[in-house]
Amino acid sequence: FGGGSVVYAVFDISLLRDGAKIQPNGNVGVRILIDAAWDRAGLAVLRVENDGALTNMDAQIEDGYLVFETGHFSDYVVAKLAATPASNGGGSSKTGDDTPVAFLAAIVLVALALLAGSVWGYIRLNGRRRRA
């Protein structure tokens, strides 16, 4: 995915039964409302796999929503993907690691910011209770 990609949002999509996360039995449809600030050109939904790999969910835009099907819930990223260079007619082959390091780093930074905010809120809330 590489440079020029923009992460708009990260969602933890899950089903809960008695407070525990469960997975669906088969495919389910998911709809994510497209924020007015998001550039629709190149907009994509990517599932973050357990090993950190990203799977493009081939989401379609329908009536102002990103729509896709999945059989597994986890973290999903809404992003504008950078344009990929056009093929050179097969004159060269690509080898090596194709991991989108900058894109993954952006996801990690968003997750850390969310975690830091949660921890800070917890500390502030507990600190106020002890003083009272």
Image: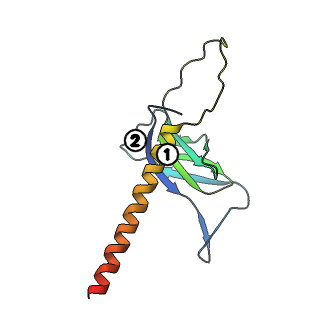
Sooner in the amino-acid sequence: mark 2 or mark 1? 2
Which of discs 2 and 1 lies nearer the camera? The answer is 1
Front in this rendered view, residue 84 or 131: 131
Look at the image and tell me in which quarter the C terminus lies: bottom left
Asked whether the viewer can see residue 63, the reply is no
Relative side of 115 to 45, left or right = left
Q: Residue furthest front?
A: 96
* SS class, disc 2: loop
Residue at (31% x, 84% y) in the render: 129
Q: With respect to residue 66, does 20 lie above or below?
A: below
Which quadrant of the figure has residue 130?
Answer: bottom left
Relative side of 40 to 74, left or right = left
Q: Residue furthest right?
A: 26
Picture coordinates of residue 106, whole percent (x, y) = 45, 44
Residues marked 2 and 1 touching at CB (< 8 Å): yes
For disc 2, the marked residue is 38
Picture coordinates of residue 103, whole percent (x, y) = 49, 40
What's the amino acid at mark 2? Trp
Q: Residue furthest left?
A: 132
Picture coordinates of residue 43, whole percent (x, y) = 49, 38
Q: CA distance from mark 2 to mark 1?
A: 9 Å
What's the amino acid at mark 1? Val
For disc 1, the marked residue is 78
Asked whether the viewer can see residue 100, the reply is yes
Front in this rendered view, residue 115 or 8: 115
